[in-house]
Image (cartoon, grey):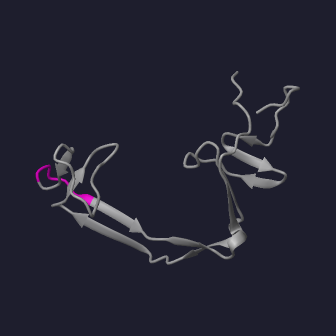
Amino acid sequence: MTNALGQTEFPGITANGGTLLGDPVVTGDNVGSGQLILLKPSDIYRIGDSGIEVSISREAMIEQDTAPTGATDTPTAASANMTSMFQTESTAIKVVRSINFAKRRASAVAFVTGADYGAPVTP
């Protein structure tokens, strides 16, 4: 974003992050346009770290799709691309690490929605 003089409004920030007034800025694909999330990392703590769970199966069915429709609590659509580990003589390995996060205080995270900071600059 540039101002009326063509100067960059936030010179310390790029699409890959940077700094704003000395504080780190992290960018990500999971934050939608018009959203800004402010958080203080030292006020976020990890709870419920139960370690790593590894499961191995030669009888599992895996839905191979970039947008899978199946879930553990709902049946998979008949048109899904299912692969049987048994029929393909394969082994499925699943690794799960359950972690939960919590705020130390209510002011640890703030959301700005509907933000409109100007039109993107096209080179």
Q: Quadrant of residue 94?
A: bottom left
Q: Measuring 65% from the left and 50% from the top, which residue is drawn there?
A: 113
Residue 77 drawn above or below residue 45: above
- 28 displayed left or right of 97: right
Q: Position of residue 120 (x, y in %)?
A: 69, 30
Q: Give the residue at x 74% y 47%.
A: 18
Please identify the residue farthest to the top as the structure is shown: 123
**Left or right: where does residue 10 sit relative to residue 99?**
right
Q: Is residue 107 magenta?
A: no
Q: Say whether residue 19 is left or right of residue 56.
A: right
Q: Nearer the viewer, residue 95 or 63?
A: 63
Along the viewing direction, whichever of 120 and 93 lies nearer the viewer: 120
Segment colored magenta: 87-92
Q: Position of residue 115 (x, y in %)?
A: 69, 45
Q: In what quadrant of the picture does the C terminus appear? A: top right
Count of marks placed on residues: 0
Secondary structure mostly seen in magenta is: loop
Residue at image position (44%, 75%) is 51
Residue 71, given in percent of the width and then of the height, sits at 29, 58
Q: Going by the picture, which residue comes out furthest to the right?
A: 5
Query: Which quarter of the figure is the N terminus placed in?
Result: top right
